[in-house]
Image: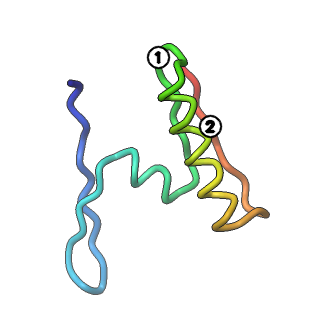
Amino acid sequence: MPLVPIVIEQTGRGERAYDIYSRLLKERIICLMGPIHDELASLVVAQLLFLQSESSKKPVHMYIN
């Protein structure tokens, strides 16, 4: 299992820890890495639907590797 970096963010309520992919999603950034299979495709579709429900006007950035 790959190591996923954690980002610590300061808020008015103290510190908050995010895994890097959750933090990127908060900024409307989706990373697509590796071979595409059903599970990965479902994950990306869910992320896109979530971001659209948050705002259909703001852009989504996708990085494909």
Q: Residue at x 69, y 59 (%)?
A: 52
Disc 1 and disc 2 in contact, CB within 8 angstroms: no
The residue wearing badge 2 is 62
Q: Residue at x 67, y 64 (%)?
A: 53
Q: Is residue 12 left or right of residue 45?
A: left
SS label for mark 1: loop
Whether 43 is drawn above or below 11: the answer is above
Hey, what amino acid is under mark 1? Gly
**For the residue carrying disc 1, how many other residues have a C-alpha within 10 Å: few (<14), some (14-19), or many (20+)?**
few
**For the residue carrying disc 2, how many other residues have a C-alpha within 10 Å: few (<14), some (14-19), or many (20+)?**
few
The N terminus - image quarter:
top left
Picture colour scheme? rainbow
Mark sitting earlier along the chain (1/2):
1
Q: Is residue 5 left or right of residue 20?
A: left
The residue positioned farthest toward the right in the image shown? 57
Residue 45, how many percent across, how many down?
Answer: 62, 41
Quadrant in which residue 63 is drawn: top right
Q: Residue at x 28, y 65 (%)?
A: 9
The residue positioned farthest toward the front in the image shown? 38
Hey, what amino acid is under mark 2? Met
The residue wearing badge 1 is 34
Residue 49, how many percent across, how many down?
Answer: 65, 53
Q: Is residue 42 left or right of residue 21?
A: right
Residue 32, how many percent across, how many down?
Answer: 53, 29
Residue 61, how many percent across, how many down?
Answer: 64, 43
Q: Please name which of the two marks, 1 or 2, marks the residue nearer to the observer.
A: 1
Q: Residue at x 30, y 86 (%)?
A: 12
SS label for mark 2: strand
